[in-house]
Amino acid sequence: MLSMLAAMFVCAQTTSTTTPPTPPAPAQIAANIVARLTTLLDLTSAQQANATTLFTNQVTVDQSLQTQMQAAQTALQSAIASNSGIAAAATAIGSLTTQQITNDATTDAAFYASLTSTQQAKYTTLQPLGQGPHGGGPGGPGGPGGPPPVGGPGH
């Protein structure tokens, strides 16, 4: 009986400690985006290769900026608590937001330029330019730093 309880205790300990799932690598995220865009836009193999490079680089930079943004948000919370350095923390957040929007828009522009006029027309109907192939970024409706979504609180 004691050995059975010990075994249950060991099992309970080993199953209760779960590690969070590892997020997909930038190359995998890019591959998923390119696969979806290939289906929607009938991308050529050359366009797929170009898009894979563009989106892998974009995601890599965005992940780095997101890490920096988390630190900047923590710094802002500390600045609020101490009532000191709020402007500097807010400026850092603004700079990181600008970098991310610039990175995303530059990637979107390069991808758009690689499309034929027929593909461009279809791409534009799928999503507004400036929102990239995987949605808007920070500062967009409902996003961090952006206004609430239309119909959300205050609308």
Image (spheres, helix red, strand yellow):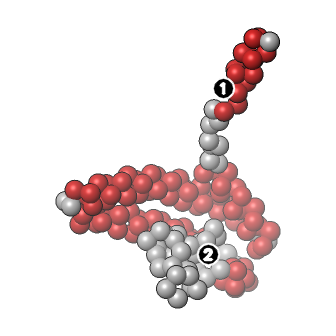
Residue 54 horizontal/vertical position (percent)? 58, 61
* Relative to 152, 7 lies left or right: right
Q: Is residue 68 visible?
A: yes
Residue 146 horizontal/vertical position (percent)? 46, 75
* Relative to 27, 109 lies left or right: left
Q: Between disc 2 and disc 1, whose residue precedes? A: 1
Judge the density around disc 2: few (<14), some (14-19), many (≥20) Cα neighbours within 10 Å: some
- At a point 45% along the width and 51% down the height, the residue shown is 67
Judge the density around disc 1: few (<14), some (14-19), many (≥20) Cα neighbours within 10 Å: few
| Amino acid of disc 2 | Tyr
Give the number of the disc on residue 13.
1
- At a point 29% along the width and 54% down the height, the residue shown is 78
Who is closer to the viewer here, 72 or 154? 154
Who is closer to the viewer here, 117 or 142? 142
For the N terminus, the image quarter is top right
| Amino acid of disc 1 | Gln
